[in-house]
Image (tube, helix red, strand yellow):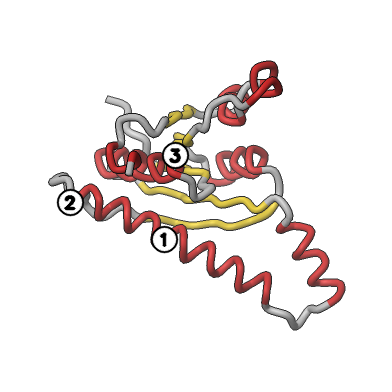
Amino acid sequence: MYAAKKILVPVDFSDVSRAAISAALQMAAVGGGEVWLLHVEAGLDDEIQDKIQTAPEGTSVEDAIDFDEASLMEAAKLEASRCDDAGRPLPFVPVHVRVTGGNWIEVALQMVDELQLDLIVTGTHGRKGVRGFFMGSVSERLVAKSPCSVFVVKPQGFPYLRD
């Protein structure tokens, strides 16, 4: 049986991201692995660059990063507690968080290379509009570019997401 030891979960704090976190935690628990939660803010690189140039003593960017890191850890704890509530408690799974700026696909692929990750678990919102029809969803582009396996999660099958 395939067991991923190092799993990356890109998180946008949506319902499908919650489903992806849950799936990744369960997979890591079965395989004795660990999970990296990644949140990418598109404009964060520009904000950091601006802060360095204009207000090096300011802490608003750091505060935002700290808040997102804490939110990622809370999301992981929530999903683990939902497994407990469903009668399927998980053993301890190490969870790491990273908040950064840039293009989330490029950042995710860089992390796969840097950390030698085995699997990416990502949620999908599906194709949106005409552009989505021709270009595919962002998750589809990740699948096409990824050097490792990608597990794509839809919210169906996670009853608590229908609340």
Nearer to us in this view, 117 or 96: 96
Residue 55 percent location from the top left of the image: 81, 78
Residue tagged 2? 85
User: Dot 1, crowdedness within 10 Å: few (<14), some or many (≥20)?
Assistant: some
Q: Residue at x 32, y 27 (%)?
A: 2
Q: Secondary structure at mark 3?
A: helix
Cα distance in 3D space between marks 1 and 3 = 16 Å
Q: Residue at x 55, y 40 (%)?
A: 112
Up-down relation of residue 92 to residue 125 (above or below): below
Residue 136 percent location from the top left of the image: 63, 21
Up-down relation of residue 25 to residue 67 (above or below): above
Residue 73's label in the rendered image is: 1
Residue 83 percent location from the top left of the image: 22, 47
Direction from residue 28 to residue 133 in the image, left or right: right
Q: Secondary structure at mark 2?
A: helix
Mark 3 or mark 2: which comes first in sequence? 3
Residue tagged 3? 16
